[in-house]
Amino acid sequence: ADTVPPDRQPFSLPIGERPDPMVAYTAGATEPWTANLLAAYIKAAEPKVVVETGSFSGETTRVLAEAMSQVQGIGMLFTVEMDDARYEHVNKMVQETPFAGVGISVIHSDALAFLRSAPTESTDMIFLDDDHEALHVKLELLEARRILRYGGACFVHDVMSLFNLAPVLKEFGGICLPLRRWHPSGGLGIMVK
């Protein structure tokens, strides 16, 4: 994995007393500051059920689980990954790393199929970071709106530049934060139910 050059270290508050787990950034993964925003939301809103789609290398999965563990010590994180190798990697990481009070389920499935199978108003927070094609994200946001509890939030990664998902977010009353990028796409979209 690539490491973050010293001149590009993100400003972040460490989770608890631990160093920022995102400093060893993997190209293509969620940027450290974006992951820290998600962790800050968890600390502020205390969601009990969190869904992450597209776990990639598990770095954001780790950040979400640590934030849930430290702020509430109870909750459930579902991370959905369709790619076989990525699923195996994240599943192993989750089994080897205890997160006090947080149940973690690594689901080997298509993200949209998983969202469609979730009960209505069963989820407090969603982080969409799998297939960034506009129609796919639109279908995911339809399901997110259905499964989120009132006041719940859905975050969408890579909404700026290459994927141009801002218009899709706006259809759902969402907003896009044009955050600094390390690769062709980035930014964070937010839709609140």
Image: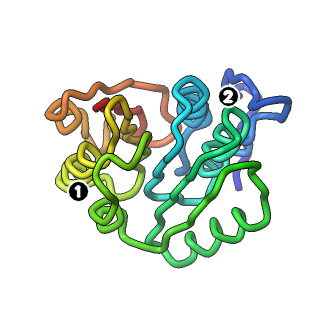
Query: Looking at this view, is 161 or 97 the one in front?
Result: 97
Q: Residue furthest left?
A: 171
Horizontal side of 100 relative to 142 (left or right) equals: right
Q: Which mark is residue 136?
A: 1
Quadrant where the image shows the N terminus: bottom right
Mark 2 or mark 1, which is nearer to you?
Answer: 1
List x then y, in percent, for residue 75.
59, 47
Horizontal side of 168 relative to 111 (left or right) equals: left
Q: Is residue 14 above or below residue 100?
A: above
Q: Locate residue 162: give its quadrant.
A: top left
List x then y, in percent, for residue 73.
70, 41
Q: Locate residue 42: give its quadrant.
A: top right
Label 1 element class: helix
Q: Is residue 110 above or below residue 67?
A: below
Q: Residue at x 85, y 30 (%)?
A: 17
Q: Which residue is mark 2?
A: 8
List x then y, in percent, for residue 23.
73, 38
- Please name the amino acid that badge 2 sits on: Arg
Label 2 element class: helix
Query: Looking at this view, is 24 or 92 the one in front?
Result: 92
Earlier-in-chain disc, 2 versus 1: 2
List x then y, in percent, for residue 78.
51, 58
- Please name the amino acid that badge 1 sits on: His
Q: Residue furthest bottom?
A: 84
Q: Is residue 177 above or below residue 101?
A: above
